[in-house]
Image: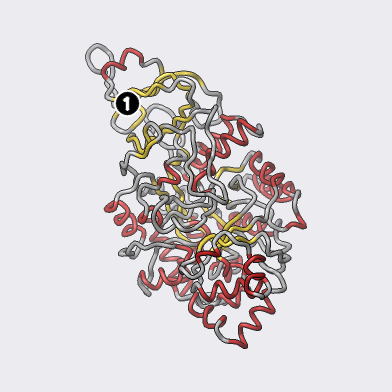
Amino acid sequence: MPPGGIMKFDTIIRGGTVINGDGSPGRRTDVGIAANRIAAIGDLGAATADAAIVIEAGGHVVCPGFIDIHTHSDVSLIDHPGGESKAYQGVTTEVTGNCGFSPFPAGPGGIEALRQGLGSNQRSRAPWNWEDLAGYAAAVHENGVSINIAPLAGHSALRIAAGAVDDHRPTDDQMTLMRRLLSESLEQGAFGMSTGLTLPPSSYADTDEIVSLASVMSHFEHAFYATHARVWAGWHVKAIEEAVEIGRRSGVPVQFSHIAIIDSREYGNGDQLVAVIDRARERGEDVTCDMYPYTASSSGFSQLLPGWVQEGGVEAMLARLRDPVTRAKVHEDTSKGWFGGLPWSFEPHVVATVASEQNRELVGKTLAEIAEMRGVDGIEAMLMLIDEEDNEVAEIMHNRVEGDVRFFMAYDHAMIGSDGQAIARAGIWESSLPHPRFYGAFPRVLGRYVRDEPLISLETAVHKMTGMPARRLGLSDRGVLREGAVADIVVFDPATVSDAATFEEPHRYPVGIPHVLVNGEFVIRDGRHTGARPGRVLQRED
């Protein structure tokens, strides 16, 4: 304390309802920030005269910055370092490298081979001038970034780096290389490994391969396994059982990504899925999940093709589509159903992104509409788009029901993760219709499911967005408001907070979130982005 017993603060947030992120009730008090950390919580009225900045937060909630446990912002935050679509939501940390796709490690083939192998799953105009996580972090820091990044190493990236891009078990040498590259990524601070088991080349792995890699993580404190599981036809329960088995056999915690039911024949059976998690937790196993608050998903159209069509990467896939005999076989096999037999309906599939000007008019149209326009069936319409756009075509798929969304959101062990990206209105995405989760996932929970159609309490919602993901990441000084913690802070109005992004107009920022601080600096102040870039690529704590 300085003379007189009054501490001098950089910022004081006065009179708000402080919800500390652990699920406990909020209380009205003040928060003082000094040297980028929370220096005091309590009555700080006597110190306001000397504070550099005083924010009057009466009627507002003050809570930890939201941690988005499931994102794909790895390179979007290089193209769009302000991360506006997430910063305006109150997100202060993005967990990246999900679904098996991370922009590292490059391996012997080099970074360009990895970039080509990942294709549209890491859409970017920025140069990639790194080889590993350390180099990626250095590039992010040199460029500057407004919010924090907590990276995972992706299994698809590991397979590409090792040259294991076909549908077969990796050789012993390839497995040795993958294990070494994963270990190096963890040593450089990665928070764990992710898989994308419906997405080649990750989907070519059997359970034993994943266990072998996940076992590497058992030697690293707090490292965990995140999985976009095999959500194939008939696998809505088996997918979770496999994830739990991998965690049990490897001895690492499990994060089941974007839990949902996408098979219309299984809607309403969410209790079967969470029962697998509950049984694992009763055995003492660390298994949690995340979800997003929408009844639609988003992916590349090529992800709906049979695995053999995608084998070998994008160029090999396009070559198959451009050979008339092989294309006929692709059409025949694809017609049997997507994800191993899920029944086709072409109205739910909406074009969200294309690369060419010639197909720009198709953005926002369904596969059914495009098929009618072109005089072909829905499968052929999809194959034409993949071919014409060199696979740079993505969709929104309306394949879920509201009852399941509400069920999974209310589940005790579910966190909130957007499955979106941090972008800006201008840039790569401006002529596209990205999923509104890019702009609205977190305020949508607070507005719709806490205030307007009450499902969970405000304290529970904040906990699912802050304390729970921080615990999963092993972050001891984020995701909570307490003295000494890093000042990642959100101030929002519980009476007005709401998402504004829609499927028709996704590039709309939310309302009711006037202030966001990252590492003690204002990124959003009075509802406007400050341009500050105080974010960091975080490292797993040992």
Task: Provide residue 540's location: percent of width, then percent of height.
Answer: 41, 48
The residue positioned farthest toward the left in the image shown: 3
Inspect this view and state whether residue 244 appears.
yes
Task: Indicate how the structure is coloured in the image.
Answer: secondary structure
User: Which residue is found at the position 62% from the left and 88% from the top?
Assistant: 325
Is residue 476 or residue 469 the one in the foreground? 469
In the rendered image, the vertical position of residue 438 relative to residue 379, given as above or below: above
In this picture, residue 139 sits left or right of residue 474: left
Is residue 421 or residue 410 the one in the foreground? 421
Task: Provide residue 41's location: percent of width, then percent of height.
Answer: 40, 22
User: Which residue is found at the position 31% from the left and 41% from the top?
Assistant: 532
Inspect this view and state whether residue 211 appears.
no
In the rendered image, the vertical position of residue 118 relative to residue 507, given as above or below: below
Which class describes the residues within 10 Å of circle 1: few (<14), some (14-19), or many (20+)? many
Question: Total marks drawn?
Answer: 1
The residue positioned farthest toward the right in the image shown: 265
The residue identified by callout 1 is 11
In the rendered image, the vertical position of residue 240 relative to residue 337, given as above or below: above
Residue type highlighted by circle 1? Thr
Is residue 421 or residue 376 the one in the foreground? 376
In the rendered image, the vertical position of residue 311 relative to residue 54, given as above or below: below
User: Which residue is found at the position 38% from the left and 31% from the top?
Assistant: 526
Task: Provide residue 334's location: percent of width, then percent of height.
Answer: 67, 74
Is residue 386 or residue 463 the one in the foreground? 386
Please, what secondary structure does the residue beneath circle 1 have? Answer: strand
Picture quarter with the N terminus: top left
The quadrant in which residue 24 appears is top right
In this picture, residue 209 sits left or right of residue 357: right
The quadrant in which residue 132 appears is bottom left
Task: Provide residue 136's location: percent of width, then percent of height.
Answer: 34, 58
